[in-house]
Amino acid sequence: MKLKQTINQTIQKAFDKANISEQPMSVSEATKPDFGDYQFNGAMALSKKLGKNPRDIAASIIENLDIDGIIAKAEIAGPGFINLWLNPLFIATNCERSRVDERVGVEKHENPIKVVVDYSGPNMAKQMHVGHLRSTIIGDTLANLLTFLGDEVIRQNHIGDWGTQFGMLIAYLEEMGEDGSVSLKDLEQFYKDAKGRFDADAEFADKAREYVVKIQSGDAYCLELWQKFIDISLGHCEEVYEKLNVNLTRDDVRAESFYNDELPKVIDALNERGSLKESNGAQCVFLEGDEIPVLVQKGDGGYLYATTDLAALWYRAQVLGAKRISYVVDARQGGHFKQVFRVAKEAGFVPEDVKLEHIAFGTMMDKGGKPFKTRDGGTVKLIDLLDEAVIKAKAAIKDKESYSEEEVEALAKIIGIGAVKYADLAINRESNYIFNWDKMLSFEGNTSLYMQYAYARIQSIFRRFDGELKGEIIIGDVLEHRLAVMLLRFEDILERTAEDASPNQITTYLYELATLFMRFYEQNPILKEGVPEEIKISRLLLADLTAKTIKQGLDILGIQVVDKL
Ligand code: ARG
């Protein structure tokens, strides 16, 4: 449910009754239990406008506030804050509704929009490395979230499959013949070997250059080789997506090469508008106030990363009809996106009302605060990292004896991959982030294991309960009250996360929810003898909604739950 909006509406009614014609500011979640559930802090700002003491304004709002089933108590605090307590009956009824709703009470957008989420975007000439991890995980979460909220999401994997290096790579693939597929398993090595041949053998180098021209002019044989190369490379990425439990398929690939035929049109369109200027033989767009121009065509006629992105922007806005286009890409490309967004809007490739955003993220660091590398200084391959996560997770499983070997295997995958994803999503995406196995695989703290454990614990309660789950929620104490309110906040949190594209708001929420549940459960036994039946049922209902909410939240993050842990 839209909890905040519901509370805001009651405040609005009080404003109307009190004849205050100003728009009330939104309530906010109380920062301490003593301050109630929500706070209205708008009286201070009104005091200047209305020329009245803020406490008097607050008093008149409270006087006119309907204690109409939503708010049970309102109190003035400090200079004119209003602390609001929600009505236990109101929260109980709404929790009951959420519990039986397969969307746990979260409504779909009334006016869904088309959103393009551009994420992952690996380069085909290289092995996927940890740098692509963040884009893949954050982008997938955003796409899952917006889909859940009812928007029409178009996932776009803008893979790097075009450029002069491919002449060299396919010449080498041709030379390798049958062995090509095998040696392509290690792309990094394949690239190095091809480069070795290129540098050492003039004939090979000539062929490589010739192949570049041929691919670009659409030569069937070279394109076939190129396609083979891309297929194998992409296959490696898909192995990673599969391991990561990420929803990217071949259909989502809109590679750089896809825009190839559009590139001359981009240049023509810019030229027609008089936006192009020659600089050192290259075609550039100079943006007002920007010192560095945007290079769109090299002196030799070749196109650039920015040209392709301009074509992609045009395609996404004009052909796909997206109203929001989100690029989940490393923060270091911030300058690039700022520029291409501006050019695209100024040139009319993208209509004014389309929201363009760079969802930037920081770099992954090791414990010592240095960019994440292997011990010998190489880039860490993503697939190795994920395999290690599963091995480490296996070691973290308690009571391994109570599971079959396959069960341990399956469990380790869910735990290990979940840990890597959660740790990444749980930090503010714009910060650099320190990769730490021990922390991410801990049962304590804000980790996926803690969340999976809370979920499993609730399932174990239900395994021991053999009655019928029928009855109602009765809010009996402060902890139950806080737990129920927290559960009703879920939709507000999801909406805010979608707006800011900041998955750590979901993890923070889940952590608070699970912690609150654990405290509630310690204090309020459920199945213990002597607990009256109706209280037992009420607590079970709250536990069930908690589990469902955790499951739904983790599902958006692309993390699975288990019934036993
Ligand atoms: N291939 C690029 C890289 O690895 C990322 C692509 C991001 N998407 C885009 N439309 N530019 O840096």
Image (cartoon, grey):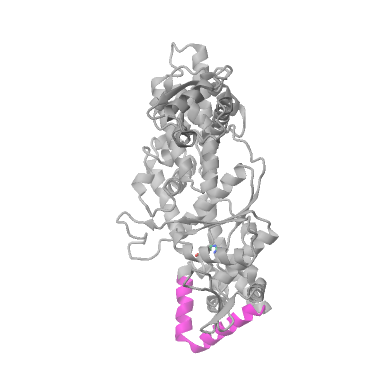
- Between residue 234 and residue 57, name the one nearer to us: 57
Quadrant assignment for the N terminus: top right
For the question of whether residue 353 can be seen, the reply is yes
Whole-percent x, y for residue 72 in the image? 50, 20
> Image check: 146 left or right of 481?
right
The residue positioned farthest toward the left in the image shown: 368
Q: Position of residue 47 (x, y in %)?
A: 45, 33
Q: Is residue 75 magenta?
A: no
> Residue, x 66% and y 80% (percent of image)?
217
Residue 451 image-quadrant placement: top left
Q: Nearer the viewer, residue 346 or 140?
A: 346
- Residue 413 in picture, x, y percent from top left: 47, 46
Viewport quadrant of the C terminus: top left
Q: Is residue 81 visible?
A: no
Q: In the rendered image of this protein, does residue 89 appear above or below residue 278?
A: above
**What residue do we see at 51% from left, 33% from top?**
489
Q: Which stretch did the figure color magenta?
A: 189-218
Picture quadrant of residue 55? top left
Q: In the image, 532: left or right of 108?
A: left
Main SS class of the magenta portion in the image: helix
